[in-house]
Image: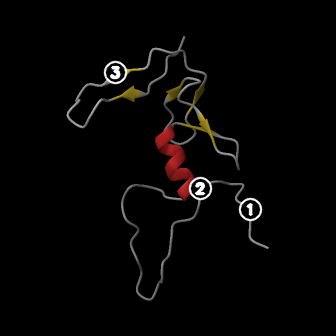
Amino acid sequence: MKYCQVVGVRNLADAVGVHCTHEAIDLCFDCGIHVCASHAESCHICKETFCATCLTFHQRGRLSLAKPVRNKGAENERPPNRCRAVATPT
């Protein structure tokens, strides 16, 4: 039996945190940790399961926490959205 791998922390000084004790129902599509029903979230476009942190970055189309590198002459370029089912504007 696999258990949820989400760790809750009370504040930034909490070095250990508290592990969730619920049984896992799925894996995060992005980072691969086991998530329980309470911590699993779905993308409404591609229907994949994510942990809360990965879903936030998935929905924003960000690949990492780092700022994107801008090329000379590139105006407001953003990394592509990782969701395979993104609707195209008509």
User: Regarding mark 2 in the picture, which secondary structure is present there?
Assistant: loop
Give the residue furthest to the top. Answer: 1
Looking at the image, is mark 3 or mark 2 nearer the viewer? 3
Q: Tell me how far mark 3 sits from mark 2, CA to CA.
A: 30 Å
Q: Which residue is mark 1?
A: 87
Occupied quadrant, residue 67: bottom left
Return the mark for residue 82.
2
* The N terminus, quarter of image: top right
- In primary-sequence order, the first of circles 1 and 2 is 2
Q: Are marks 3 and 1 in contact (CB under 8 Å)?
A: no
Residue at coordinates 53% horizontally, 27% vertically from top-left? 35
Q: Residue furthest left?
A: 13
Where 10 sits versus 90, above or below?
above
Which residue is denoted by mark 3 in the rendering?
A: 18
First in sequence: mark 3 vs mark 1: 3
Q: Residue at x 68, y 54 (%)?
A: 84
Q: Residue 55 occupies which quadrant of the picture?
A: top right
**Amino acid type of disc 1?**
Ala
Q: What kind of residue is marked 3?
A: Val
Mark 2 or mark 3, which is nearer the start of the sequence? 3
Cα–Cα gap, marks 1 and 2:
12 Å
Cα distance, mark 3 to mark 1? Answer: 38 Å
